[in-house]
Image: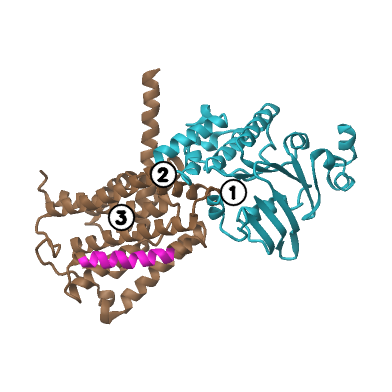
Chain colours: A cyan, B brown
Amino acid sequence: MLELESVTKRFGGLTAVKEVSLHAQPGEILGIIGPNGAGKTTLFNVISGFYAPDAGRVRLDGREIGGLPAHRICALGLTRTFQLVKPFGNLSVLDNVMIGALTRVRAVDRAREEARRVIATCRLEAFAKSRARSLPIGLRKRLEVARALATRPRLLLLDEVMSGLNPAELVEMIAILRRLHGDGVGLIVIEHIMAAMMRLAQRIVVLHHGEKIAEGRPAEISRDPRVVDAYLGEEFVLADA
Amino acid sequence: MIRDGFLLDGLILILLWGAVSGAWNVAGGYAGQVSLGHSAFFGIGAYSAALLATRFHQSPWLGLLVGALLATVAGLVIGYLSTRLKGPYFGLATIAFSQVLLIVASRWRGFTSGSEGIPVPFRPGLWTLGFQSKVAWVYLILGLAVTVYLVARYLETSRPGYQLAGVREDEDAAEALGIPSRRLKVAAVAASAALTSVCGGLWAQYVGFVDPFYVFSVDLSVRFALNSIIGGIGTAIGPFVGSLLITSLETYLRATFSDFKAGLIGIYLIIYGGLLIVVVRFVPQGLVGWLGERLRAVGRYARA
């Protein structure tokens, strides 16, 4: 459904993403890992329409989307969350999610109903009336997911929605993502927490210095010498073994 | 019924300045594009009405329409700027725009009568917008105020309004959620400009004289913003509450200090400035928001 072909993005002399090709199947959970500065978030920005690629193609269901504005790409069924969460701080949680729902549902009342359903899916009922600004970070991450989900994406790009969560919140977030997966939503997940990633992702792509250095099932990735070298380190393999 | 001309005049001005401020609030409050040059649109409206009546002998109603169209075009340009310039830079650009119009209006003597200004002819009748009775003006300006209020209510309850709130809060997040943020911002600024222009046209008809140094002044732009900020920015009723306070205060000060020497004429500026500091420092949500919180607090106390 999503297909990247030799996508490159440069900032002046720096090549942040270099000839990356990858694909995501409908309903799949694809993980993207890599050290800081590997180009993961830049790649998300290119896919979701915040940057135009300098070279290469981005296709959604066979249609070229590289360079389209973000709101158009969202309308085509691909939505993303932000690593540094961007809640509508002065609005309530319900209004935040409803603004997402209004993209598909034109009537405000029906969008509000839909927002309530999404809020329930994401276990935010108790905070529906709270100002988004007042939520702790764990709940703000969940709001970020809920709001994106309200736009009814077929493919959802999640940028570190699990980092900064306490263990209980982490369990809850994984349950939410599993449920989305069960509903047939495709997920592309950037994450630093390897344990969670290994359990969640069906396939993992590893980026290093903007290039794809490995791709495969979690078990394969964790044993790949290039990945261990660039990112995971010896201890991870030992701990895993 | 009030028959006192002084009070009726005060009421008309409170409603009129409230309406302009409400029009400003569409861009400055709901879209988050704080303009300090809205007198540009007010002046466009005032001049359109005055010039159509004096130079082309047309009905001022047509002047209102022409003014609204011209202001919409100007608003689209300024709205486009708002997608390029952020915060204070946008504010400065709007000031510059109003000052350019001031220079044009005060120098183009052959058409605008330059700095002398234009007396708007009084011709009695609804079609010519000339009313002997101030009560008629009260109804007309009340209609204007209600229209502006309803536009604001629309922005609080409709799909585009909610989406605009998202854009105001975080543009990137709004884009990612499928909201065409630029288009919405530009549309909001253009609508705000058109409404402001209509207010300017009616003001010119009511006052009967258009002076370029007044209608394009930064003073006036600041007043539009000030009413909203003091009353409650981004609320439908806020600009009117602000106008009630500021306009009555101004009328009172003018009446009180009119006998004094020129040294005290600027005192209203000091009082405006002081009020602004107090509000921004202690009640940044404005009087409406502050009152709302107090009432809720009392409600909680009463239930407990």
Q: Which residues are magenta?
A: B62-78
Left or right placement of residue A211 versus residue B133 in this view: right
**Dominant secondary structure, magenta:** helix
> Marks 3 and 1: CB-CB under 8 Å?
no
Dot label at residue A78: 1
Give the percent coordinates (x, y) of residue B153.
33, 45
Dot label at residue B62: none
Label 3 SS: helix
Is B111 in front, or is A216? A216
Q: Chain of mark 3?
A: B
Give the percent coordinates (x, y) of residue B71.
34, 65
Asked if one can make out residue B22 in the rendered structure from this viewpoint, the answer is yes
The C terminus of chain A lies in which quarter of the figure?
A: top right
Residue A159's image quarter?
top right
Magenta stretch contains residue B66: yes
Name the amino acid type tagged 2: Val
Residue B35's image quarter?
bottom left
Quote the CA–CA distance across marks 2 and 3.
Answer: 20 Å
Identify the residue at image location x=39%, y=52%: B273
Identify the residue at image location x=71%, y=58%: A5
Identify the residue at image location x=68%, y=26%: A168
Label 1 SS: strand
Crowding at mark 3 (Cα within 10 Å: few <14, some 14-19, many 20+) = many
Tag 1 and tag 2 share a subunit? no
